[in-house]
Amino acid sequence: MASLATSTLVYSTPVRIKTSSKPRSSSRTCKKTVPFLVTRADSSSLLLHAAKYTVDKHIQSGMVVGLGSGQASGMAIQYLGRLLGTGALKDIVGVPMSVTSASEAAKAGIPLDVYQDSSQIDFAFDDADIIEEETLVAIIGRRKSQSDESIIQEKSILKTANKLVFMITENQYVGGLEGSIPVLVQALNWMETAEEIDDLFLGDAEVWRRSSIGQAGPTGGDYPFITSEGHNVLDVIFTSPIQSLAEVAESLDKVDGVVDHGVISKFPCTVVIAAESGGLNIVDR
């Protein structure tokens, strides 16, 4: 993890650009650019600035904050703990989205609470694997490899939050997405569910059951990955560009045996994009 003491943010008045949305969405996105001083050009330092910006811009004393998982989220947790330690922020309560974020928050000295259906969350930040341009629909859970991490809990906290920020690099903000979408399915009849999903996206995707140990083939081998809720994970690997994540999510929701998936759409939403050119691009919707 990059050191929090090595870089300095330099904010300026943002330039806001309003753009009309694509035909698939009636909402509007707003984009602004926040320049900053870059001391190192690697992705870690860029994400560190994204994490600091997110905390400084959105978190105030007295908030209940959803704590995400991933590299940028870990940096934001560490920075938030540092502000609490110096007294710059007070009375913050964190609601972790994973065991990893809970551990990082505890080490940073952030008071924690356990998520419940009745929880009220003022703000949440998280990493995303990829985000669809304009719509800001995100994919999470591609890289989760620990059974105690839960896409269901992560999505629940993100959807409960009054405001949400994703922190990503610019190569994760794209149109015409490719790659995989994780799908949680009932373990008992996973094969039937996998076949139905395969038929649904015939010719456009392959369906592999995730293994808990390396690559074990389409069926997940002898040791398939089991979530904390007891579900299998199917990685739906698209071999052609995804035209609409929202439509894919809607189709998956209708398949018998599908419990949940890694596609999330939540508004209002802000995406903080760490650009290789040395700035932060902020997209709101």
Image (tube, grey):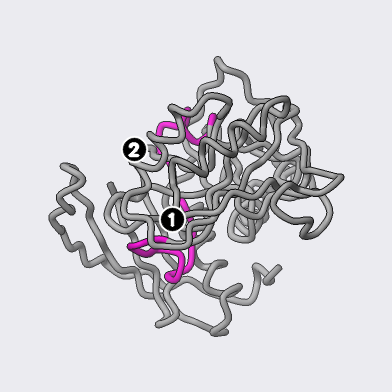
Percent of width and height locating residue 124: 51, 40
Nearer to the camera, 197 or 150: 197
> Which quarter of the picture shows residue 171?
bottom left
Q: Nearer the viewer, mark 2 or mark 1?
A: 1
Q: Earlier in the sequence, mark 2 or mark 1?
A: 1
Residue 123 visible in the picture: yes
Percent of width and height locating residue 1: 71, 68
Percent of width and height locating residue 266: 38, 37
Nearer to the camera, 181 or 114: 181
Q: Amino acid at mark 2?
A: Phe
Tell me: residue 23, above or below residue 10: above
Q: What segment is highlighted magenta in the picture? A: 156-177
Q: Residue at x 56, y 75 (%)?
A: 43
Q: Amino acid at mark 1?
A: Asp
Secondary structure at badge 2 equals loop
Q: Is residue 125 magenta?
A: no
Q: Is residue 265 left or right of residue 107?
A: left
Q: Is residue 31 left or right of residue 36?
A: left
Residue pointed to by mark 2: 267
Q: Is residue 168 magenta?
A: yes
Instruction: List the single residue furthest toward the top.
Output: 118
Q: Residue at x 43, y 55 (%)?
A: 204
Q: Residue at x 54, y 55 (%)?
A: 237
Residue pointed to by mark 1: 204
